[in-house]
Amino acid sequence: MKSFLKCLVGVLLKYLAKIILWRFSPRIIAIAGTEGKTEIREAITAKLLESNTLRIRENSRGFNTEIGLPLAILDEPSGKSSLSEWYTILLSAFKKAFFQKEFPEVLVLELGVDTKGEMEKLLNIVHPDISVLYCIRPRGFGDEDFLSTMEKEFQILSSRSFRFIANKDDERIAKQSAVFCPPGKLISFKNPQHIAEEVEILLSEILGAMRIV
C-alpha cells in the first residue's frame, strides 16, 4: 500500500511540475555527476544572483530524485511518512501549478542519478538549457559496472541538453570527450567560480537569443 501511495504521489508531482514549467518556461541549468554537485550548484547560483536581476531558484540537497525534483520545482517540502502532510503538499502544488502568477526565470537543479534509467525519468520532467557534468567516480573499489552505467546515463543528459559543459580534469569524462561534448565543451573544474562564469556566459547567450526572437 505504501509503495502504491508513493508511486501515486510521484506521478501527481511530476505532472504538476511539468504543468508549471510549461506555463512559465524557465531556463533550466542542470548539474550532474557522481559527487560534487552541491558545490557546483551553489557556485552557479551565487554567481547568477550576484550579476543578474533574474529570479532564481535552486533545489536543496537531496531534492534531486524523481520525487525530490518536482518538489524543488514546485517549492514544496517533503511530506516524509505523513499522509496528511502529503495531502497538504499536493493541494498546495496543485494551486501553484494552475494559479500561481509568478515563477523564477532560472532554475538551478541537481540531478541525482545512481542507477540505470534514472536520468531518463528526470529528463521526462525537465529539459535542460545548460547541463554541467562534474565527475564520474567510483563509490568503492572495483565498481566498474556502476561507472559504466553512469557513463551511459550522463551521455543521455549530454544528448538532451541545449548547451553542455564537462570537466576535462576527470579522467573518464576526458576519455569520452567525443561522446560527451558534441554540443558543448570541456573546461577545467578546479575552480567552481570558473564554471559559474562559463554558465553565466551561456545563459546570457540563450536569453539574448530569446529576446531577438
Image: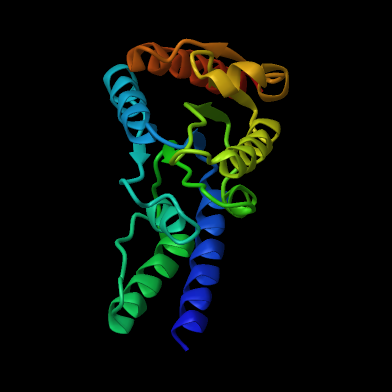
Vertical order, 144 against 91 (above or below): above
Quadrant of the image occupied by residue 47: top left
Vertical order, 110 against 100 (above or below) = above
Residue at the farthest bottom position: 1
Q: What residue is at 29 percent from the left and 25 percent from the top?
A: 49
How many labels were placed on the picture? 0
Q: Tell me which residue sits at (63%, 52%) in the image.
A: 116
Q: Quadrant of residue 196?
A: top left
User: x%, y% of residue 186?
Assistant: 57, 13
Residue 183: x and y in percent read: 69, 20
Describe residue 68's horizontal placement relative to residue 148 as left or right: left
* Whole-percent x, y for residue 32 in the image: 49, 35
Does the image show residue 86?
A: yes
At x 48%, y 27%, the residue is: 135
- Look at the image and name its color scheme: rainbow
Q: Is residue 211 visible?
A: no
Q: Relative to residue 180, is residue 125 drawn left or right?
A: left
**Quadrant where the C terminus lies?**
top right
User: Relative to residue 98, is residue 149 depicted above or below?
Assistant: above
Q: Nearer the viewer, residue 135 or 101?
A: 135
Q: Relative to the observer, which residue lies in front, 166 or 161?
A: 166
Task: Name the residue located 61 percent from the left edge and 19 percent from the top edge.
Answer: 209
**Of residues 189 and 16, the one drawn nearer to the viewer in this rendering:** 189
Q: Residue furthest front?
A: 142
